[in-house]
Image (cartoon, rainbow, N blue to C red):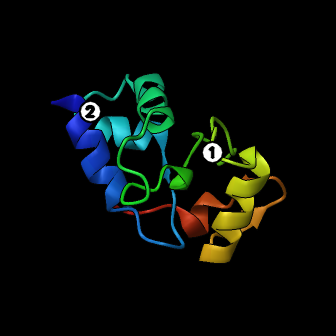
Amino acid sequence: MFQDLVYKYAAKIPKGKVATYGQLAKLAENKKAARVVGMLMRNNPYYPKVSCHRVVGFDGRLVGYTGTGGIKAKRKRLIEEGVKFKGDKVDLKISLWKS
């Protein structure tokens, strides 16, 4: 099932790396379902095993985080885990997870 695959792959994103919503959609075999991945991350029943804060927009923007503290907290957590930024966006050349 699509949602099971999304959570399975999201759980594999290591500390210090991020994946994009589109990347997870493609891994779960529906490359056009990035918005659905966003919905699944928003309703993530597997936190903290599935770390939804490690999922970012296609261009590295921090979007769609509804956890405590919002986007500021997401950025802080990612920095603490070693994710590299260029301005307000994750530097995907360095921090994108290679699945």
**Nearer the observer, 77 or 29:** 77
Q: Which mark is residue 3?
A: 2
Give the structural element (helix, strand or loop) at label 2.
Answer: helix
Q: Is residue 45 left or right of residue 16?
A: left
Place of residue 98 in the rendered image (x, y in percent of width and height, measured from the top left): 38, 63
Q: In the rendered picture of this protein, how many numbered marks are placed on residues?
A: 2
At x 74% / y 64%, what residue is drawn? 76
The amino acid beneath tag 1 is Gly
Q: Which residue is denoted by mark 1 in the rendering? A: 67
Question: Do we see residue 61 in this rendering?
Answer: yes
Residue 22's quadrant in the figure?
A: top left
- Choose the circle earlier in sequence order: 1 or 2: 2
Q: Secondary structure at mark 1?
A: loop
| Horizontal and vertical percent position of residue 93 | 59, 63
Measure how far apart labels 1 and 2 are at the Cα level: 20 Å
Residue 54 locus on image (x, y percent): 53, 56
Residue at x-position 26% and y-position 33%? 3
Q: Residue at x 42, y 52 (%)?
A: 47
Q: 48 or 9, which is in the foreground?
A: 48
Quarter occupied by the C terminus: bottom left
In the rendered view, does 46 fall on the left or right side of 88? left
Q: Is residue 85 above or below residue 60?
A: below
Image quarter where the N terminus lies is top left
Does 99 sit above or below residue 44? below
Task: Please name whichever residue, 51 or 21, is drawn nearer the observer in this view of the structure.
Answer: 51
User: Compared with residue 61, is residue 54 higher up or lower down, i.e. above or below?
Assistant: below
